[in-house]
Image (cartoon, rainbow, N blue to C red):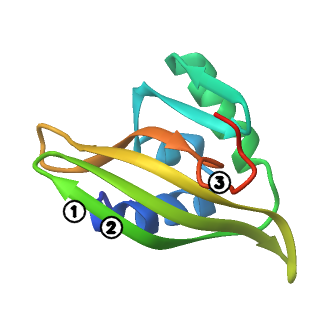
Amino acid sequence: MKSAKTPQEVHAVLAAAFNTKDVNVVMNVYDANGIIFPEPGKEVSGRDQFEEAVKSICAVPGVMEIKTVYCLQSGDVAVGRSEWSITDNGKTQIAAKGIELMKQQSDGNWKIVIDHAFGAEANLVA
């Protein structure tokens, strides 16, 4: 599986990873010391809980697509805004607008540290 060499590649790498439905492949796109919001209002941290959240997302049938709305980088950190969906046989299973904080790792690859999958939804109250 390809690693993101730039923050602009992270969304494409994440979608490809989710489409393998392999939790280990998906986990490689994340810094498991970070946090993920797998659903509105639910913050998950810690490797075990993080992995459980990824498993539940991988269990959704269909193909994930992620459109990068923007990606802003300063040094070894970047913030991205995405629009993503999982579609199965033409039916949208889930769709949202997210915000992701990414960090360049010591090996040069970029990983997601904070994934707020619903963070850019208009009606979200933080």
| Residue 50 placement (x, y as % from top left) | 58, 27
CA–CA distance in space, label 3 to label 2: 19 Å
Secondary structure of the residue carrying tag 2 is helix
- Tag on residue 74? none
Quadrant (top left/top right/bottom left/bottom right) for the N terminus? bottom left
| Residue 123 placement (x, y as % from top left) | 75, 51
CA–CA distance in space, label 1 to label 3: 23 Å
Report if the CB atoms under discs 3 and 2 are less than 8 Å apart.
Answer: no
The residue wearing badge 3 is 21
Which kind of residue does numbered mark 2 sit on?
Answer: Glu
Q: Is residue 19 left or right of residue 47?
A: right
| Residue 78 placement (x, y as % from top left) | 27, 51
For residue 23, above or below residue 19:
above
Q: Is residue 26 left or right of residue 111?
A: right
Quadrant (top left/top right/bottom left/bottom right) for the C terminus? top right
Secondary structure of the residue carrying tag 1 is loop
Residue nearest the observer in this picture, 120 or 64: 120
Which kind of residue does numbered mark 1 sit on?
Answer: Thr
The residue wearing badge 2 is 9
The residue wearing badge 1 is 6
Quadrant location of residue 2?
bottom left
Q: Is residue 74 left or right of residue 36?
A: left
Report if the CB atoms under discs 1 and 3 are less than 8 Å apart.
Answer: no
CA–CA distance in space, label 2 to label 1: 5 Å
Which residue occupies 10% across, 49% down? 75
Camera-nearest label, 1 or 3: 1
Nearest to N terminus: mark 1 or mark 3: 1
Q: Residues within 10 Å of mark 3 (few under 14, many from 20)?
A: some
Which residue occupies 37% across, 60% down? 10
Report if the CB atoms under discs 2 and 1 are less than 8 Å apart.
Answer: yes
Which kind of residue does numbered mark 3 sit on?
Answer: Lys
